[in-house]
């Protein structure tokens, strides 16, 4: 997590305070060397303890998540941690806080800490490429989770079928509107494969309904507050809108707040992710539907593939995790 940020420098080999402890002036050279070795061993143990690991894992894996200020990625992290525990993996998870440069530093630190594999949920699919290439050059396999990395060799990409999910969202919204209407799209963070693929799928799916017009597409960065602000502005320009596709549930929930009493009545909103808050909104009728992902499953499968890659075993380059539309009729099938 973000609490690990200050540990990297302290955990580097031969820290200054360990040298001081090891090289006592009254000891002979042989004893000093033995003491230094012992000090380094203690430092390694302390580093494992500080990172939230018990140090017992036979395979050391580093994981950098784009942000933990999003329920979806919190669930992804939980799935990864549970599988790491089950497989006796020493897992360190860092929160990049939606900062591509911070994420680059995290991957650099992982490379220096001799991890056996890295899992990245990129802040930016393009900006992550140099760091992934550096890890690959160092012989460390990299697995992408939920979003891919463009222009770099990955051991595997584990993600929901976002294009198919976008198509399903278009179909669900169009059918609810009776094949006629005016809709707007709230886009995710620019540069992410998830936003691009979901948008692509929705655009492909909505073509089957020529009487539905897409009035506007505007980024809200997968964020609830930005979703509220963007939807508020779109309503001023397009008061006749009767459908909204948001590329994640957080933006959908922001849009619902902007719509007020219109949400679920005169304006139908479809989200994407199937987060606990999203499913709750589906139950109460303010959110018509959410294309539900399985974030814990993505985290779990990412760990499994990282372990295989670390051992030199063959892994599938692309692992698609299924998605399904959650509506009021079937929302009971999905657990938050």
Image (cartoon, rainbow, N blue to C red):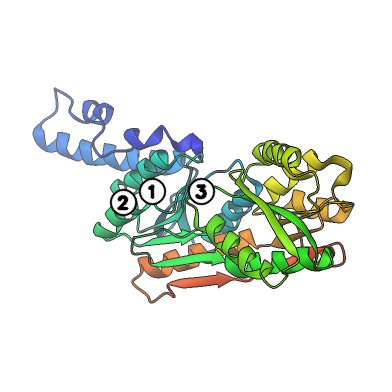
Label 1 crowd bin: few (<14), some (14–19), many (20+), radius 10 Å? some
- Residue holding disc 2: 130
Mark 1 or mark 3, whichever is nearer to me: 3
Q: Position of residue 66 (x, y in %)?
A: 50, 46
Residue at the left extreme? 29
Q: CA distance from mark 3 to mark 2?
A: 18 Å
Numbered disc 3: secondary structure: loop
Do residues under tags 2 and 1 come within 8 Å of each other at their CB atoms? Answer: yes
Q: Position of residue 273 (x, y in %)?
A: 67, 57
Numbered disc 1: secondary structure: loop
The numbered disc on residue 143 is none
Q: Can residue 312 be seen in the rendering of this structure?
A: yes
In the image, taking residue 166 as reference, residue 26 lies left or right, namely left
- Residue holding disc 1: 127
Residue sitting at 35 percent across and 54 percent down?
129
Is 201 or 22 nearer to us in this picture?
201
Is 282 or 234 nearer to us in this picture?
234
Residue sitting at 35 percent across and 59 percent down?
116
Q: Earlier in the sequence, mark 3 or mark 2?
A: 2
Q: CA distance from mark 2 to mark 1?
A: 7 Å
Q: Position of residue 125 (x, y in %)?
A: 44, 54
Q: CA distance from mark 1 to mark 3?
A: 12 Å
Residue sitting at 37 percent across and 75 percent down?
313
Mark 3 or mark 2, whichever is nearer to me: 3
Q: Can residue 323 be seen in the rendering of this structure?
A: no
- Residue holding disc 3: 190
Residue sitting at 45 percent across and 41 percent down?
49
Q: Earlier in the sequence, mark 1 or mark 3?
A: 1
């Amino acid at each position: 997590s973000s609490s690990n940020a200050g540990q990297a420098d302290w955990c580097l080999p031969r820290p200054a305070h360990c040298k001081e402890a090891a090289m006592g002036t009254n000891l002979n050279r042989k004893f000093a060397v033995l003491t230094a070795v012992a000090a380094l061993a203690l430092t390694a143990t302390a580093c494992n303890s500080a990172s939230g690991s018990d140090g017992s894992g036979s395979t050391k894996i580093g994981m950098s998540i784009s942000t933990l200020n999003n329920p979806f990625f919190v669930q992804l992290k939980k799935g990864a941690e549970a599988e790491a525990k089950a497989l006796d993996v020493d897992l360190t998870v860092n929160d990049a806080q939606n900062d591509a440069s911070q994420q680059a530093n995290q991957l650099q630190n992982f490379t220096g800490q001799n991890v056996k594999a890295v899992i990245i949920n990129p802040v930016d699919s393009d900006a992550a490429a140099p760091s992934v290439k550096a890890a690959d050059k160092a012989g460390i396999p990299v697995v992408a989770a939920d979003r891919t990395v463009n222009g770099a060799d990955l051991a595997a990409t584990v993600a929901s079928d976002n294009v198919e999910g976008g198509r399903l969202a278009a179909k669900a919204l169009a059918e609810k509107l009776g094949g006629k209407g005016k809709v707007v799209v709230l886009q995710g963070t620019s540069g992410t494969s998830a936003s691009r693929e979901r948008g692509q799928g929705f655009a492909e799916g909505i073509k089957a309904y020529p009487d539905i017009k897409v009035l506007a597409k505007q980024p809200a960065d997968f964020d609830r507050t930005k979703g509220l602000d963007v939807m508020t502005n779109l309503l001023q320009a397009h008061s006749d809108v009767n459908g909204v596709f948001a590329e994640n549930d957080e933006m959908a929930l922001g849009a619902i707040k902007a719509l007020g009493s219109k949400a679920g009545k005169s304006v139908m909103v479809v989200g994407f992710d199937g987060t606990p808050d999203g499913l709750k909104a589906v139950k109460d009728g303010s959110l018509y539907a959410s294309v539900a992902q399985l974030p814990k499953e993505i985290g779990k499968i990412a760990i499994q593939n990282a372990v295989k890659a670390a051992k030199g075993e063959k892994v599938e380059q692309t692992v698609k995790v299924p998605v399904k539309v959650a509506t009021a009729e079937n929302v009971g099938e999905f657990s938050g």
